[in-house]
Image (tube, coloured by chain):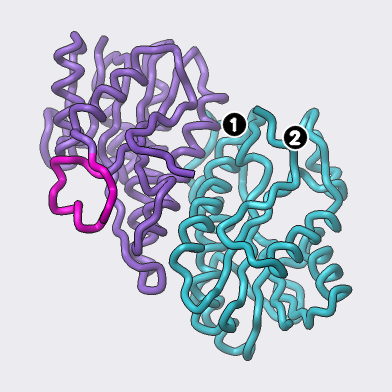
Chain colours: A cyan, B purple
Amino acid sequence: MRTIVIGTGTLGAAVHKTLVEHGHEVITAGRTSGEFQADISDIERLKAFFAGIGSFDAVANAAGDVFPGPLEQTTDEQWANSIAAKGMGQINVVRAALPYIADRGSFTLVSGVLSDEFTHAATIGTTVNHLVEGFVKAAATELPRGVRINCVSPTVLTESVAYHPYFPGFTHVPAAEVALAYLRAMSNPITGRVLKLHRTDS
Amino acid sequence: MRTIVIGTGTLGAAVHKTLVEHGHEVITAGRTSGEFQADISDIERLKAFFAGIGSFDAVANAAGDVFPGPLEQTTDEQWANSIAAKGMGQINVVRAALPYIADRGSFTLVSGVLSDEFTHAATIGTTVNHLVEGFVKAAATELPRGVRINCVSPTVLTESVAYHPYFPGFTHVPAAEVALAYLRAMSNPITGRVLKLHRTDS
């Protein structure tokens, strides 16, 4: 299986490693590193990237920044940039890759724990994660040629120590465990699913 | 209670009527009609509107267009305009009104049946509705001074006959029944809730 992994940070690197260990031929793309450059907030560059990459079976996206802040202090720029990057950026990965991905191929996107849990500066993150998960659920019903789409929703990564203070009392998850969820999404006959790497409390 | 109703279409008119019948002093705002003009996709005009309106206790939004199409044919413009109008437009209503709304005031936004159900051209609608519902759930935890926020999620309106062919097999709901949900959201001690005017199938 020939798989494109977008994102070369902690999560992207872990997804890359896990997929290689499981026999995938992996192509990496990052904003400034990786074998190819692809800024997911720039759909024209994404289209050129996927058009030039040759055939592929799966796209695993581990890129997409949000720019959080306490709701009352959020700026127009934080909202616009967060929706453009993690929100429309991921939607545009799918739109740009769809003409080229193989029949019965798969997309795996990323949301996060703030879909279901809240902190003192969660609103932008929650909003963008819901956008992504809504897209995944509906796109799963519309994608042609047996192409599947799922989403991985991790809590804060164990390795992302600098973020831990923003998630007081939250458990964290090793990037390698999140990477397994990507593999699970790609390798099983599921679509429209959100694979949660966090507890869902009532 | 002094309540601002944004949107002068079928739903906005029904909300207006129901609130007046239940003793609210209602101020109406629409893009081109109503007592005041307020295009919710223009945050600067929204800020000027709320700054000039005097004190108010509640905002009920019944405005927000989406521009749907089959996923493979959706354009950048359809995505951008849908997110700007029904998505960021409603978020900006809250951001612009928040400095002026009374303590223990309330916001009621609108999502829709495509959050939970799908048609052959649902993806933009589903995505934007999830964005709105995610915002409502998180904002409910962050809003100050006891201000509440909820969301009404109607199926297609009985009165919107022209839309019925796009929702084959869906039940419809009279605008007056949706308007009652707005009143329920405003008048009871609930926040972060999505009030559904449609069946939720498993």
Which quarter of the rendering shows the C terminus of chain A? top right
Q: Which residue is mark 1?
A: A70
Chain letter of mark 2 equals A
Relative vertical location of residue B6 with respect to residue B130 in this rendering, above or below: above
Q: Closest to the observer: A64 or B72?
A: B72
Q: Quadrant of residue B177?
A: top left
Query: Spatial distance from mark 2 to mark 1, Cα to Cα?
Result: 12 Å
Q: Assign a secondary structure to mark 2.
A: helix
Residue at 32% across, 48% down: B85
Main secondary structure found in the magenta portion = loop
In the rendered image, residue A59, in percent from the top left (x then y), is placed at 65, 73
Q: Callout 2, which amino acid?
A: Tyr
Instruction: Give yes or no for contact between labels 2 and 1 (Cβ–Cβ under 8 Å).
Output: no
| Above or below, comparing residue A19 to residue A27 in the picture | above
Query: Which image quadrant: the N terminus of chain A?
Result: bottom right
How packed mark 1 is, by other alpha carbons closer than 10 Å (few <14, some 14-19, many 20 or more), is some
Please name whichever residue, A116 or B202, is drawn nearer the observer in this view of the structure: B202
Number of marks: 2
Q: Which mark is residue B136?
A: none
Magenta stretch holds residue B197 = no
Label 2 belongs to which residue? Answer: A166
Residue range corresponding to the magenta coloring:
B156-172
Indicate the quadrant where residue B138 lies: top right
Judge left or right: residue A155 versus residue A54: right
In reply to whether residue B160 is colored magenta, the answer given is yes
Under circle 1, the secondary element is loop
> In the figure, is residue B116 to the left or right of A186?
left
Q: Quadrant location of residue A36?
A: bottom right
Residue drawn at (86%, 44%), measured in percent from left and top?
A161
